[in-house]
Amino acid sequence: MKELLVKWGSEFRDADISSLQDGVWRVQVGDQTYILKHRDTRTRVWEEYNLLTWLTEQGHPISPLLYTTEGLPWAEYQLGIYVLYRFVEGTPGDELNSCSPEFAREAGSTLARLHQALAAYDAGDAFPTFDLFHEVASFAWPTVQGYAAQRFGHTLHALKETIEGELVNPYESLPRQLIHRDFHPANLIFRGNKIAGILDFDRVRLGVRLFDLCYLATAVLSEVFDDPNKRSAWLSFVQELIAGYHSVQPMERTEGYAFLCMAYLIQVLFAAYFLDAGNIGLADRNLAMLMWLYDQQEFLQPVIEKMVAG
């Protein structure tokens, strides 16, 4: 790997390298820390580089890609493509009390400001499109239904009717733009009570803006789901999250109306991914979250709609 790293400068010759996960390494050079990642295509790297550079210039807490000595934002090594970032110092959000009102408001307002910037980015049309509804209809729902119909048949039928009755038409009118698509607590770096870094922009796509907000909400639910007290606190978290977002970027009424249905789709998609990967335990957990979320609709739906309308 050091043969690869020296493409960013001779100082990397003596770097200490440790694997964090598949395709991600921590690189230490003296008192400087970097993150090395594998990427799939040069086109996606250029899109990410240009976007991160622009966001940094706009004052957002982003760590941009670093140029190699060859003047490129990537390096090629053994038929692979790799990128390098400076490590963002701070505490990842998944190590904090993510259900706290302070966390919810800060995360919501930060996402709103990011969305405003992403909507203003001129080269947004270069990114691929992500259609959650199509992915669920064509892949996730048949997969989940085939697996869970015997146990949850009645509830799945009711849930499908709810989604078809309440989301199909509003979905087409939801605001679309560039979205982060991986906005979860571990990708938010805090210093004190403020977000000092937003990580992982390699999944940015053109899609429904509401997805990012619901994705963060379901990610926090996943963190606290096994604790009944924290799980109950999640209901207040959602309200604070929406309040934080809405204070910066006013939400449309259709977004308030579609919020819970969007969360259902995300849970169905995750359950299907885990089933497809053979991870039955995580699939069952996401199905349990889906059923619990559906049970909260009668209470939470009018609260969200009223907040957005107000």
Image (cartoon, grey):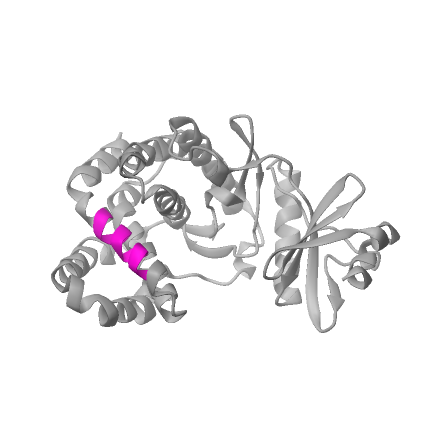
Q: Percent from the top left, x then y, of residue 69?
A: 84, 56
User: Which residue is at 57% across, 56% downward?
Assistant: 202
Q: Is the magenta stretch mostly helix, strand or loop?
A: helix
Q: Would residue 230 be seen by someone viewing this image from the given angle? A: yes
Q: In the rendered structure, does residue 287 fall within the stretch colored magenta?
A: yes
Q: Is residue 270 left or right of residue 65?
A: left
Residues 122 and 109: in front is 109
Which residue is nearer to you in this view: 59 or 105? 105
Please give the name of the residue rendered at 88% of the width and 53% of the height, measured from the top-left corner. Answer: 10
Residue 39 falls within the magenta-colored stretch: no
Chain part drawn in magenta: 283-292
Residue at the farthest left position: 154
In which image quadrant can residue 309 be found? top left
- For the point 41% across and 30% down, which residue is it? 105
Tag count = 0
User: In x, y percent, where is residue 206?
Assistant: 47, 56
Residue closer to the observer: 14 or 154 = 14
Give the vertical position of 130 relative to 230 (above or below). Answer: below
* 21 sits left or right of 179 in the view: right
Judged left or right of residue 159, residue 201 is: right
Residue 310 in percent (x, y) is at: 27, 29
Q: Is residue 176 above or below residue 303?
A: below
